[in-house]
Amino acid sequence: MKKKLLTIIALGALLAANLGADQAGQSWARLYRRLEDLKQKNEILQNITPLDDRSLEPFFLESLNDLVYGDLSKYRESRNTYDDWELLTRTIVKELGDIKGQTAAETVWEVARTAEVPLLKSESLIALGQMRALEYAEPIATMLRNINFNTRSDKDAAEIEAYGAVVALDKLKDSVGFESLFYASIGWYSDRVTDLADEAALTVSGNPVPALDAILLKAEDYRDKRAALNMALRSDASEADKAGIASTALAEGLKYSESDYTLVRQLANLRSDAVRGMIEYGVSDGETAGLLNEAVDEGDMDEKLISLQALGMAGTDEAVTFLADRLSYYNDRQISGLGLNNEELTIVKQLIYALGISGNEIALDPLSQMSYLDYTPALIRESKEAIDRIKN
């Protein structure tokens, strides 16, 4: 039998060599149809797929339908023939993806939905993406969402399927896949999948910030909120959009109170990243200045200092009034003879800096008062430099 097959292949190759690419593909397709054995069909198929001949799309669809619904589907049921059936099916599915054979999308989805072998499922999903079969974007996103939950014992198989779903959604560029891609990017997978999902999420829609804003608000895990914020800050969105989601994140970080140390740190990290986002991209509105003022009281020293800096960089009357009132409070302490500890002096130093970079004249009165109070010469010098910076 093998000798006969080799003879057929040799004759086919000789014939194909004397034909154009289109005719060669059709010649091999006729040989494929004449054979019954799956191994033989697969041997023939190896001579067809390198052609990447789009005119053969009807042949590949016919062959796939036969494997999925027709006479050859019986080989799927037997353990002895399943591997041959799977290999042949996977080869055809891959070729349909390569030639973007959209007419086969329905059958390829059936393979993806029912495949027992992870590689076949993954290859089918990728093919759907290559075909731009947008009607399957939502079910593929649902499939990936379910894999993200990591409820299966065979993680290797699940990761192979997740990879196929990520590639498919990346190629489909439909916003319906965004949330599943986001959670895949921070999921349990290896870097191969998480990195690809991260890249895909950032490009699946023109502006990912609205979707990330929604995730940030509804996510229950503070780490997920933080991840949504940081993806937005890394995106190509406008500075205004980034400032807006930073404000949302800070509000979320201030909304909750925890006693568990781990959760306390997660909230602090969320707030700190949000404030750093504002330092880089600006304060979105007056309400955000109030949030920053609240963050000064809520956080540790590092958080206090960056929140004061963000208020100074905002430079609005409201933001600078918050800063001026704080410096006035410490000035009153000095007037009353109440000494400031090292932490309070560090805050005063940051207030001077923040007021100076604000460029707002509201800062002048409390800064000027410092020269008449019992501050260190270094602090008084810095206050005068801040005044000069505002005036100039």
Image (cartoon, grey):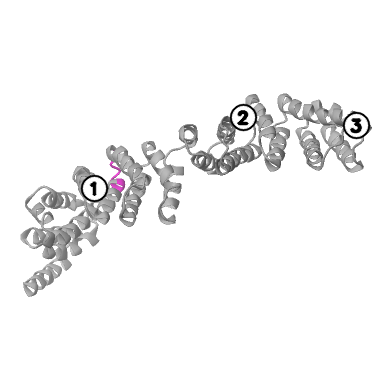
Q: Which mark is residue 284?
A: 2
Q: Residues within 10 Å of mark 2 (few under 14, many from 20)?
A: many
Which amino acid type is shown beneath numbered disc 2? Answer: Ser
Q: Which residue is mark 1?
A: 112
**Residue contact between numbered discs 2 and 1, judged by CB atoms under 8 Å:** no
Q: Is residue 332 left or right of residue 54?
A: right
Which corner quadrant holds the N terminus? bottom left
Which amino acid type is shown beneath numbered disc 1? Answer: Ala
Q: Is residue 132 magenta?
A: yes
- Image quadrant in which you'd find residue 326: top right
User: Foreground mark, 1 or 3?
Assistant: 3
| SS assignment at label 1 | helix
Q: Position of residue 309 (x, y in %)?
A: 72, 37
Q: Position of residue 381 (x, y in %)?
A: 89, 40
Which amino acid type is shown beneath numbered disc 3? Answer: Gly
Q: Which mark is residue 301?
A: none
Seen from the viewer's position, the closer of residues 360 and 271 is: 271
